[in-house]
């Protein structure tokens, strides 16, 4: 079994996100320096999925409403004005979380670090703030 400290998790996640966005959304991504969530203004949709086992953690996918709509339209091969409601957007964000974290899980399991995934949860940033109060 490999030690978690010997793995390049940033590379694992970066490659998983790039591959999913390229394959499922036909979007090319470029890596930028990490930014604080405090820098993001406005409403956001947050998809979260947890993994637990020999390794534990969370994957959170944040997107503002406009980008969440673009991702949904791309995945469903429709125009953004054809999106019927938030349920479609939430389904796409959840599925993206599943695919990205599924790739990470596969890489961790290949290294001998077995884990299981939770089902994704979807919240808006307003829902997240309300949960803290």
Image: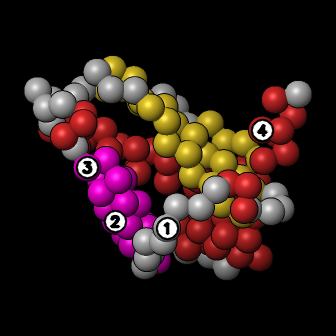
Where is residue 94 shown, x and y percent of the image?
56, 46
85 shown above or below 114:
below
Quarter assignment of residue 64: bottom right
Is residue 8 shown to the viewer in this render? Answer: yes
Residue depicted at 57% across the width and 52% down the height: 61
Q: Dot 4 lies on which element?
A: helix
Q: Can residue 16 be seen in this view?
A: no
Dot 1 crowding, Cα within 10 Å, few <14, some 14–19, many 20+: few
Q: For residue 33, which numbered disc appears in the image?
A: 1
Among the 4 quarters of the image, the one containing residue 15: bottom left
Q: Mark 3 points at which residue?
A: 8
| Proximity of marks 3 and 2: CB atoms separated by less than 8 Å | no
**Chief secondary structure of the magenta span?**
helix
Dot placed on the residue nearer the N-terminal end, 2 or 1 = 2
Please state the extent of the stretch shown in magenta in the rendering. Answer: 8-27
Q: Is residue 81 left or right of residue 59?
A: right
Helix or strand or loop: what does disc 2 sit on? Answer: helix
């Amino acid at each position: 079994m490999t030690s978690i400290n010997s793995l390049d998790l940033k590379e694992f996640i970066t490659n998983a996100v790039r591959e999913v966005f390229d394959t499922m959304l036909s979007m090319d991504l470029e890596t930028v320096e990490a930014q604080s969530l405090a820098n993001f203004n406005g409403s956001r949709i947050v998809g979260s999925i947890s993994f637990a086992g020999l390794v534990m953690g969370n994957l959170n996918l944040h997107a503002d409403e406009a980008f969440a709509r673009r991702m949904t339209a791309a995945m469903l091969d429709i125009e953004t004005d054809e999106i019927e409601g938030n349920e479609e957007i939430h389904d796409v964000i959840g599925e993206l979380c599943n695919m990205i974290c599924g790739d990470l899980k596969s890489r961790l399991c290949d290294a001998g670090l077995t884990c299981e995934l939770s089902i994704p949860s979807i919240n808006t940033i307003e829902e997240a703030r309300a949960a803290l109060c």
